[in-house]
Image (cartoon, rainbow, N blue to C red):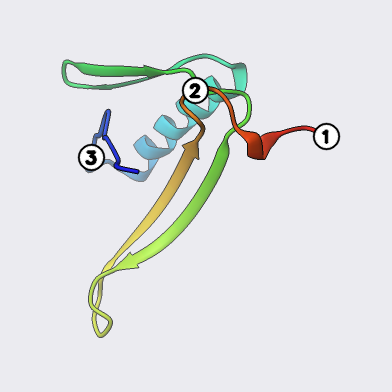
Amino acid sequence: MPEEVLFESERQVDRDAAADYLRTVADKLSDGSSVTLERGGEEITVDVPSSVEFEVKVEREGPADGPGEIGFELELEWPEDGTDDSLSVT
């Protein structure tokens, strides 16, 4: 399935600013609020359902014989139509 990027933001910040951003998103997830992401004049609001697929990944990119770049990714994913047979309750 092709991927369509609806919003993307990448910038250099210090660790405290990254933690503050994650904390704000976590608070919104915890209380069931919509999450609004902003960059310049662009913004997108996402209503995250109560059950999501949560992926945590650490990866290294770069040459096998030299220093590369480490990526630490957190991803929430859910069906756009609000259904997910894999999360059925029996």
Q: CA distance from mark 2 to mark 1?
A: 21 Å
Q: CA distance from mark 3 to mark 2?
A: 28 Å
Location of residue 2 with respect to 24 vertically, above or below = below
Label number found at residue 10: 3
Q: CA distance from mark 3 to mark 1?
A: 41 Å
Residue at 49% across / 37% down in the picture? 76
Residue under circle 1?
90
Residue at 17% across / 20% down in the picture? 40
Residue under circle 2?
81
Q: Nearer the viewer, mark 3 or mark 2?
A: 2
Q: Position of residue 56 (x, y in %)?
A: 51, 51
Q: Position of residue 24 (x, y in %)?
A: 46, 25
Local packing at callout 3 (Cα closer than 10 Å; few below 14, some 14-19, many 20+) is: few
Outermost residue, left side: 41
Q: Amino acid at mark 3?
A: Glu
Q: Is residue 70 left or right of residue 12?
A: right
Q: Amino acid at mark 1?
A: Thr
Q: Quadrant of residue 13?
A: top left
Q: What kind of element bears circle 3? A: loop
Closer to the N terminus: mark 3 or mark 2? 3
Q: What kind of element bears circle 1? A: loop
Which quarter shows the N terminus?
A: top left
